[in-house]
Amino acid sequence: PNGLQAANHLTESLKNLGIEMYRFKTGTPARVDKRSIDFKTAQSLKNRLSKDIKAVGVFVDEDKKYIDYYIKNNIIDIVQLHGNEEPEFCKGFDVPVIKFFNPDTFSKVDEYDTDYFLFDSGAGSGKEFDWSILPECEKPFFLAGGINKDNLRRALDEVKPFGIDLSSAVETHC
């Protein structure tokens, strides 16, 4: 089955798991990244989500107008910027913004004024990285990068993130 067919019971499953946000990787054509979806698929998935679950659009170095199109059409509730976006670009969206940082960019955290940060290995490999190198910050942040059933409790206890971003380590590709 394709991802859309697998999403038939999406809302019920997410609510049962206590999931509060669901990410849509958009922009990058599916032929380049098999986790990417187009606008029509994102719209269909959003329509299946409970109003209690926030849809997060993941964008990598996209044009602001492209991102605004998803916002204005009520496809996403939160923007996640997962590329090399400059601090000024991250401002001015009508929804909350999550900015991604990896170990190579942790030193730039203080330059950004977004609602949330996301700290990740950046590789999409599903591999855990050394959490002791995370930057100190007052802003709520998500932890990503190899979080799975074996290290989830340790991540919550040791790092104390606002949220956990589960992706490569737990996903399957239908």
Image (cartoon, rainbow, N blue to C red):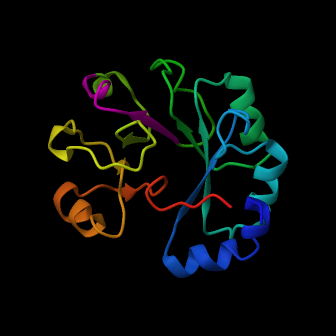
Q: Quadrant of residue 12?
A: bottom right
Task: Find out whether residue 102 is within the magenta segment.
Answer: yes
Task: Where is residue 51? Give x, y as percent.
Answer: 68, 68
Q: Looking at the picture, does residue 127 appear above or below residue 147?
A: above
**Could you tell me how many numbered marks the image carries?**
0
8 in relation to 23, above or below: below
Quadrant location of the C terminus in the rendered image? bottom right
Q: Quarter of the image containing the N terminus?
A: bottom right
Residue drawn at 68 percent across, 21 percent down: 63
Q: Is residue 119 left or right of residue 18?
A: left
140 in magenta:
no
Q: Which residues are magenta?
A: 97-107
User: In the image shown, does 98 or 152 lie closer to the viewer?
Assistant: 152
Q: Measured from the top left, where is residue 47 in percent x and y?
A: 79, 63
Residue drawn at x 54%, y 43% as measured from the top left: 96
Determine which quarter of the picture holds residue 103: top left
Identity of the residue drawn at 68% across and 33% down = 32
Left or right, residue 32 beside residue 153: right
